[in-house]
Image: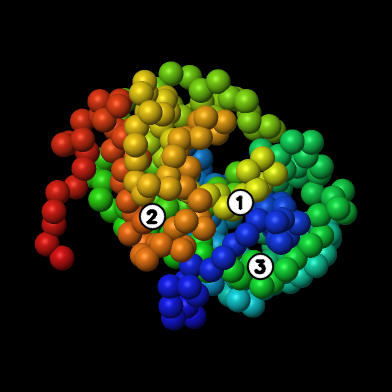
Amino acid sequence: MPESKDSAWPAIPYEPWADTLATLHLWTQVVGKIRLACSPWLNHSWHATFYVTPVGLSTGTVSRGYRTFDAEFDFHAHELVFRTSDGGRRSVSLEPRTTADFYSEVVDALKYLDLAVAIHPRPNEIPDAVPFSEDTVHAQYDPEAVRRFWTGLSSIDRVFRAFRARFLGKASPSHFFWGSFDLAVTRFSGRPAPPHPGGYPNIPLWVMQEAYSHEVSSAGFWPGGEAFPEPIFYSYAYPTPKGLAETKVLPGAAAWNDELGEFVLRYEEVRRSASPEEALMAFLQSTYEAAADAAAWDRAALEMGDLPR
């Protein structure tokens, strides 16, 4: 259990766990698609996301027929656990193994629990996606690296939830998107947005257009990838209002990234600051204010006033 700033905000360099990250990304997609198949559509694909828990990432409660169940990645015990409302339980070990083997055991776990769930067996938002059952390349799992990632994610989620609580208008929970493998929290102006142009690999255009049907200011955490090989916090607006890229935001290390089209703050800058919580909150608040002001949001109607504690 984290007892200090350094243990609560561990270093999460991308390169040492890049292979494990790629494998875990695919495994979360397998489980995420189970939630997707068992949940009624909720605006902006919120029905498909995971939530940070005291031990890892969970689907939350989903339904199949008259029964309910959940699936949770436990990054302490390093197992994926399925639990059903009638007392059923089945676990799948998180260890070095091929994605094809992991997928096969998840399918067997569903059969064992008598959960008839069929999913689209190919990853989303990944170029050149290989069906899960055929993927024998992604097979790495470093438990210590995963533990560090989850520990950092848990601290980030705590700040994201506090930030979300400041908003009176429509806002998402702090939730984890397994398609893009990032934790995000999003605020809405309430006004419709122009149709999104799409452009994401292996994801239908209509999904993207529904996700961005209304104006947003969205912020999140991404652990890195080949295009940007280090963990970052990001913040963007859709549509991007004129002048947003030129706006100065906090903390001083944060800046607009033209290639990504969003504000970026390196995770390492936050964890090394005197107060990572304050540094991250400053980034979330200042980038939201920059977007809301540039797009002329009705901030007085959307933001919470001071409440007694």
Residue at the image position 65 percent from the left and 56 percent from the top: 14
Are the two marked residues, 1 and 3, in contact with CB atoms closer than 8 angstroms?
no
Residue at the image position 79 percent from the left and 49 percent from the top: 132
Residue assigned mark 2: 280
Residue assigned mark 3: 145
The amino acid on which the numbered mark 2 sits, given as a three-letter code, is Leu
Q: Is residue 304 above or below residue 104?
A: above
The amino acid on which the numbered mark 3 sits, given as a three-letter code, is Ala
User: Residue 21, located in which quarter of the rendered image?
Assistant: bottom right
The amino acid on which the numbered mark 1 sits, given as a three-letter code, is Glu
Q: CA distance from mark 3 to mark 2?
A: 22 Å
Which type of secondary structure does the marked residue at label 3 adopt? helix
- Residue 43: x and y in percent read 44, 37
Residue at the image position 86 percent from the left and 53 percent from the top: 137
- Foreground residue, 121 or 164? 164
Residue assigned mark 1: 230
